[in-house]
Image: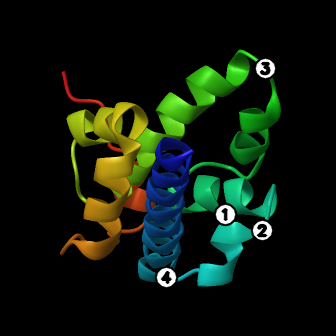
Amino acid sequence: MIAFGLIFLVSMLVSLVMIAAVWKIYTKAGEPGWASIVPVYNSIVLAKIAGKEPWWGLLLYVPFINLVAMVILCIGLAHAFGKDTLWGLGLIFFGFIFFPLLGFGSATYQGERAATPSPSF
């Protein structure tokens, strides 16, 4: 029972830190922070921040397609804050570390143009 209580407290702490981090990311991007906690609307705003059309956010609710959409949106989010593709992969696989670093760190929102880098050959 003590282990259950400890696991519950740790998961609640991680959840609160993630909510605060995503709130801060939305605020840095010029969006209202409360948009990060509203279901469905948060993914539409996330797509906008990542430099994609709003329907990209809705793809997060389609099974199997959501995996590809999440990769594209996280990489776009990283680029929108001046980070590289590797940082975007960190958002996907280690989100509990990279989202707080992005939200509470010194990264600034570069805008939608930075989210969609031009291909280089």
On the image, the x and y values in percent for residue 18 come to 47, 62
Disc on res. 27? 4
What's the amino acid at mark 1? Val
Give the residue number, with chain letter if any, for mark 3. Answer: 63
Pick whichever, 44 or 10, lies toward us. 10
Q: Is residue 21 above or below residue 76?
A: below
> Callout 3: few (<14), some (14-19), or many (20+) C-alpha neighbours within 10 Å?
few
Tell me the residue at 49%/49% (across/down): 2
Gap in angstroms between the C-alphas marked 1 and 2 = 10 Å
Which sits earlier in the primary sequence, circle 3 or circle 1? 1
Closer to us: mark 1 or mark 2? Answer: 2
> Callout 1: few (<14), some (14-19), or many (20+) C-alpha neighbours within 10 Å?
many
Q: Is residue 7 visible?
A: yes
> Callout 2: few (<14), some (14-19), or many (20+) C-alpha neighbours within 10 Å?
few
Which sits earlier in the primary sequence, circle 3 or circle 2? 2
What's the amino acid at mark 3? Pro
Element marked by disc 2: loop
What's the amino acid at mark 4? Thr
Give the residue number, with chain letter if any, for mark 1. Answer: 45
Q: Is residue 118 left or right of residue 120?
A: right
What's the amino acid at mark 2? Val
On the image, the x and y values in percent for residue 22 come to 49, 66
Tell me the residue at 81%/26% (across/down): 62
Gap in angstroms between the C-alphas marked 3 and 2 = 20 Å
Closer to us: mark 2 or mark 4? Answer: 2
Colour convention of the picture: rainbow
Element marked by disc 1: helix
Which sits earlier in the primary sequence, circle 1 or circle 2? 2
Give the residue number, with chain letter if any, for mark 2. Answer: 38
Q: Is residue 108 visible?
A: no
